Image (spheres, rainbow, N blue to C red):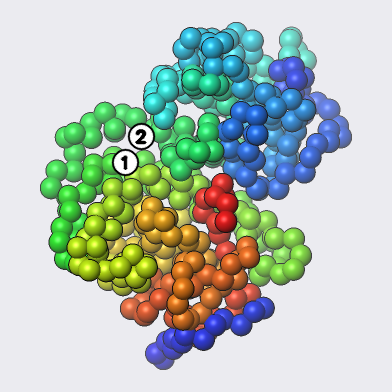
Amino acid sequence: MKTRYDRSPAPSGCALFLVLTFFLIVGITGPAFSGTVFQNPDFQYVVDIPVGWEVLDARESNFVSFTDPGRVAVFQVISFPGEQFVTARDLDSFIRDRFGASGESAGFRYLGDHAVFADYTFATGPGEDGITVRGYMTFINGDDFDFAVMAYAVVEHYEEYHDSLLSVLDSFSPDARNRMQPGPVSTFYAAPVKERLGVVADGQTLALPSGAEMMLPARVASEGLQEAAQVVIEREARVLAQYAPQEGEPSRIGDGPVPYWARAWRRYFRMIYRDSYDRLGEVAENVFHDLSRSGVDRDEMPAHILAWLQEAEYKRTGSLSDLMSPAWCLVDFAGDCDSLGLVYAILLQHLGFDAILMVSMEYAHAVVGVDIPGEGARFPFEGREWLVAELTAPVAIGMIAEEMSDIGGWVGIKLDPTISW
């Protein structure tokens, strides 16, 4: 049966070791924290904690810690004045000595600053009473502040929590104003590839909306960076899988608390969006100039970019995530609804248009909502009415499949939660 589309609006429907011994204590309380973004007003960093994790200790803004629901894992951010340590290695040595940690570490550059990534094991206390933990740490030597960012679990649970530890560490951004850059874990893993960018991806082009071709920048076309981005996606898919809807949990967002699975979906796509956003900046600039040269007014660009992306080949990965990275989509000019939706939202945001992702478990589909004038179906989200954009069918902006037009079946996702609108 042929799918029907229409333009009718969709119907409304501290001390360090004090915290390290937390898992020996019963009944620790702290401010509830259910997966939304945490921003430190004094030190300006941002973290995006996995759903269900809670603030464990935030009495001092320079020492903030979180824990998982099972209370066997900890995520900590310790902030220091920028002049306290000369190098990231000095900060690494300071923390390693205080914790009595052992393991491997390596230096890298993070957002232009010297940093160290470490895999450490240590005990939380002396003698037989100590509990052994293992996890990952990143030490960042910035100008205004230095940071020790640590995620670890009781060693018996390390393998079980491995993806979550890397994920929460990767959610750290040292500055809310510079949030849309890959996280420290992603940056560390991609660093060896970046050193070889000058000798990869020669000749890879992308056909722009007018048909003109642009040479894709190496940070998009590099197979190594595509693989690194896909590693992030698959890791986040494994974290997301822990939040599959439970029996009795609503499959829709109603007037009550947002279900865990919906919060987890939101964080999943935020992590991927953040990892990919900056890499697509040069593509967005070329698309803008290409459309301008073709006589397209700026206000008309979202519709033209949508029509262009709708020409992409429908393609899925078959992996757990079943999601191609945005860079991979542009290299192959292919993707499915959510991968192309991420590409579309990223390009629009670079061009100054606010956009959200809309995903549906009920419809097994994803579309984009754009805050622009125009006729058609709109999705109410956070005080705005978002014009719907379908990426995998050749229909005009504002049109949605009739059988998917019930807004109750959709979850809206603000991809950059630090943006105010």
Q: Position of residue 223 (x, y in %)?
A: 26, 44
| Horizontal and vertical percent position of residue 104 | 47, 17
Which three-letter amino acid code belongs to the residue tagged 1? Answer: Leu
203 left or right of 93 in image? left
SS of the residue under disc 2: helix
Circle 2/circle 1 CB separation < 8 Å: yes
* Nearer to the camera, 2 or 42: 42
Judge by depth and name the residue closer to the eye, 300 or 158. 300
Residue at image point 55% right, 21% down: 145
Q: CA distance from mark 2 to mark 1?
A: 6 Å
Horizontal arrangement in the rendering, residue 235 relative to residue 279 (left or right): right
Question: What numbered label is drawn on residue 15?
Answer: none
125 in relation to 309, above or below: above
> Which residue is painted at 14% across and 43% down in the image?
202
Q: Dot 1: what SS? A: helix
Where 252 falls versus 72 (above or below)? below
Q: Which residue is mark 2?
A: 190
Numbered badge on residue 225: 1
Three-letter code, disc 2: Ala
